[in-house]
Amino acid sequence: QVRLVESGGGLVQAGGSLRLSCAGSGRTFSFYTMGWFRQAPGKEREFVAASWRSGGSTSYADSTKGRFTISRDNGNNMVYLQMNSLKPEDTAVYYCAAQEVVGNWGYWGQGTQVTVSS
């Protein structure tokens, strides 16, 4: 099992940048595909980005591709989300998640709020 804690959220103006961090305790991150999701008020939780366990490849939602970058440090059990060129529509609670079984995001953090002002 792994426990996840996000940090780094806050208030930023449109066009600005933020870097979210996700710290894990328990089993080493190398066993997991790690991802970021977000949920805006009144909307369903949506996929943002993932760093796959095998091969080191990454995936992004169309809405974040080219602006957000996911990275991981397995040795320190950390995952990061660098967010650039932020837009008001990026405002949401951002969650870190871990996938041990393919297709099952079984572990979640508590979330961190990101607010982008126009």
Image (tube, helix red, strand yellow):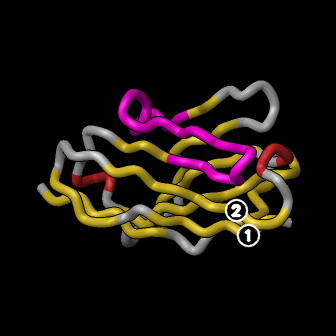
Residue at the extreme bottom? 110
Magenta stretch encompasses residue 12: no
* Mark 2 → mark 1, Cα distance in angstroms: 5 Å
Identify the image quadrant of the C terminus.
bottom left
Q: Mark on residue 24?
A: 2
The quadrant in which residue 20 appears is: bottom left
Q: Quadrant of residue 55?
A: top right
Callouts 2 and 1 close, C-beta under 8 Å: yes
Residue type at numbered disc 1: Arg
Q: Residues within 10 Å of mark 2 (few under 14, many from 20)?
A: many
Badge 1 is on which residue? 3
| Range shown magenta | 60-80
Mark 1 secondary-structure assignment:
strand
Q: Nearer the viewer, residue 11 or 63?
A: 11
Instruction: Look at the picture and state if 47 lies above or below 6.
Output: above
Quadrant housing the N terminus: bottom right
